[in-house]
């Protein structure tokens, strides 16, 4: 699927402009909205994100020569745009990133969610189900009961409806919920599905593999491997821990980058390790991986290289 970042950027520009008290280009704004249905959807999404940000920004002190802003509930429509000058580069960049990368609308009307490495996000669905998106992940919601994981990892807590099952496409594989809490990780051609509650049907029109609580399926090289998994460990990344089972150092490096936000790299695809890593310790000191995994960690530019000892 193709996304269009220029639409998101333009939506943010128009959202900021229309919040200004002296905004006058309503004809230009209307023409932009009418040029493509995706424009209005993107604009609405950005405005919603900005409204959520207003209470946070209102708590920030203005420069000494400017009076402190009134409480968030009293902010006029142009409040945020009128204070961009004193927000500061780092804060403004963070706000732009939050607005433009977390949610946008694809041309087909899908809601797209993306997290940066080291970031997580909870997505509430209309029926009471939830999706928790791990760092470095991209998810498309294709309606109330369908989604597509394009990359990364997510934990799904789904309200079961036998008449309208929840369907997830992850890479080339379709998963169908049977009243479930399940975790899905998609990294290139590798798919890892683990079930904590209920059941998931993997590839219902092909292999039709049923996974019950405490079971996982790993697809590598086009083949599925079924294994046991501790139900309490399913989705453990939410609690700051990730585990590996026969993963290469290259795979471990990629997962650590996604989960921590720090940059790790390895060219070693032969050395394979199993274990569990507390992410806070790695964020604080990447060298902590050496005794944990029995590997060598070296600084490389703005990141870290993992190699076998």
Image: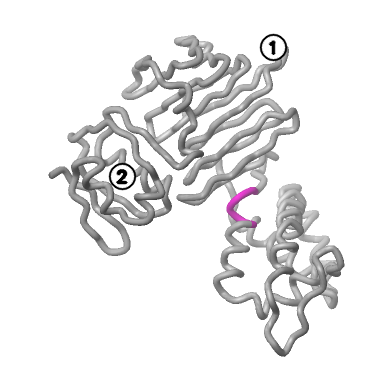
Specify few, some or many for label 2: CA neighbours under 10 Å numbering under 14, 14-19, or 20 or more.
Answer: many
Give the Cα distance between marks 1 and 2.
Answer: 40 Å
Question: On the rendered structure, is 137 left or right of 192?
Answer: right
Q: Residue at x 72, y 90 (%)?
A: 65
Question: In the rendering, which numbered label is found on residue 253?
Answer: 2
Left or right, residue 69 beside residue 201: right
Residue 233 to residue 258: above or below:
above
Q: Quadrant of the N terminus?
A: top right
Q: Nearer the viewer, residue 129 or 67?
A: 67
Residue 162 badge: 1
Q: In the rendered structure, does residue 291 fall within the stretch colored magenta?
A: no
How is the structure coloured here? one colour
Kind of element beneath mark 1: loop
**Which quadrant holds the C terminus?**
top left
Q: Residue at x 36, y 45 (%)?
A: 256
**Residue 15, percent across and down?**
75, 63
Residue appearing at x 21%, y 56% in the figure:
298
Q: Which residues are magenta?
A: 99-103
Q: Quadrant of residue 230?
A: top left
- Estimate the x, y position of residue 138 in percent, counting from the top left: 53, 41
Image-based side of 106 in relation to 171, left or right: right
Prevalent SS, magenta region: helix
């Amino acid at each position: 699927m193709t996304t269009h970042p220029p639409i998101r950027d333009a939506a943010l520009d128009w959202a900021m402009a229309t919040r200004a008290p002296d905004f006058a280009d309503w004809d230009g704004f209307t023409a932009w909205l009418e040029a493509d249905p995706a424009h209005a959807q993107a604009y609405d999404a950005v405005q919603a994100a900005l409204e959520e940000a207003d209470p946070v920004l209102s708590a920030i002190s203005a420069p000494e020569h400017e009076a402190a802003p009134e409480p968030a509930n009293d902010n006029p429509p142009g409040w945020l745009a009128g204070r961009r000058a004193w927000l500061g580069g780092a804060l403004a960049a963070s706000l732009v990133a939050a607005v433009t990368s977390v949610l946008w609308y694809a041309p087909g009307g899908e809601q797209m969610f993306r997290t940066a490495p080291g970031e997580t996000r909870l997505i509430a669905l209309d029926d009471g189900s939830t999706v928790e998106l791990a760092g470095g992940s991209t998810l498309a919601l294709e309606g109330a009961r369908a989604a597509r994981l394009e990359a990364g990892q997510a934990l799904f807590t789904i309200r079961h409806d036998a008449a309208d099952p929840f369907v997830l496409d992850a890479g080339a594989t379709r998963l169908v919920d049977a009243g479930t809490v399940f975790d899905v990780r998609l990294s290139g051609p590798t798919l890892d599905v683990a079930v904590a509650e209920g059941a998931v049907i993997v590839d219902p029109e092909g292999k039709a593999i049923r996974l019950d609580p405490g079971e996982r399926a790993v697809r590598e090289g086009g083949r599925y491997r079924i294994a046991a998994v501790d139900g309490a460990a399913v989705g453990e990344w939410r609690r700051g821990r990730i585990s590996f089972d026969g993963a290469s150092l290259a795979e471990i490096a990629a997962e650590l980058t996604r989960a921590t936000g720090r940059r790790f790299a390895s060219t070693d695809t032969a050395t394979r390790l199993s274990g569990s890593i507390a992410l806070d310790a790695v964020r604080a000191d990447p060298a902590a991986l050496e005794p944990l995994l029995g590997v060598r960690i070296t600084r490389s530019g703005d990141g870290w290289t993992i190699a076998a000892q």
